[in-house]
Amino acid sequence: TYGMEGPDIFYPEWFSGTWKVASETKEIQAPCGIALFGGNVTFINAQNDLGNILRYESRFLVDGKGRVIADREFNVKSIAKVALGENSVVDVSAATPNKFSCLLSPAGSPSMLTVDLIVLNRRQEP
């Protein structure tokens, strides 16, 4: 087992900058069951997304100690823009290595969603 082995994930120097990304949905799995996936409708909608390619930008910055790290807020906004709609990220209240919190308003949705991603363990291979 492992815990927080480092304060963040660090990338090679050549990662620094903004990248054009293409991400394709290749497979959908529900290892904890369809109910925990969100139900039948959510699972079927995800399956209908197979083969879809999202094109967005991803950015990596140099921190105050000269290490390359992900620009979490930029990256989430970039992915959400193409996946959920142009103005889908309403607010980002935390964008740290251990917590990311935002308020989303997906295009066509009647409600907003609060999203909290919390890192409990971190391990990086050399």
Image (cartoon, rainbow, N blue to C red):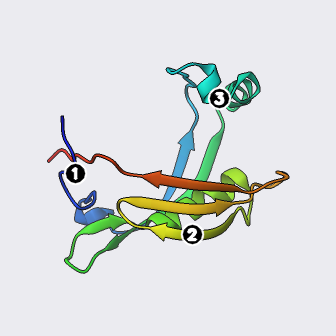
Q: Which residue is mark 1?
A: 4
Q: Residue at x 62, y 42 (%)?
A: 53
Q: On the image, numbered disc 2 is attached to which residue?
A: 92
Q: From mark 3 to mark 1, how far is it between C-alphas?
A: 34 Å
How dense is the environment of label 3, judged by Cα within 10 Å: few (below 14), some, or many (20 and up)?
few
Q: Quadrant of residue 115?
A: bottom right
At x 27%, y 64%, the residue is: 14
What residue type is disc 2 on?
A: Val
Tell me residue 73's x, y (percent).
50, 67
Circle 2 SS class = strand
Q: Residue at x 82, y 51 (%)?
A: 109
Q: Earlier in the sequence, mark 3 or mark 1?
A: 1
Badge 1 or badge 2: first in the primary sequence: 1
Nearest the camera: 44 or 53? 44
Quadrant into which the N terminus falls: top left
Q: Disc 3 vs disc 1: which is toward the camera?
A: 1
Q: Which residue is depicted at the point 28% across and 46% down?
A: 121
In the rendered image, the vertical position of residue 39 relative to residue 75, given as above or below: above
Tell me the amino acid under the disc marked 1: Met
Q: Position of residue 101 (x, y in %)?
A: 53, 61
Q: Nearer the viewer, mark 3 or mark 2?
A: 2
Residue occupied by mark 3: 50
Per the model, the C-alpha gap separating discs 3 and 2 is 29 Å
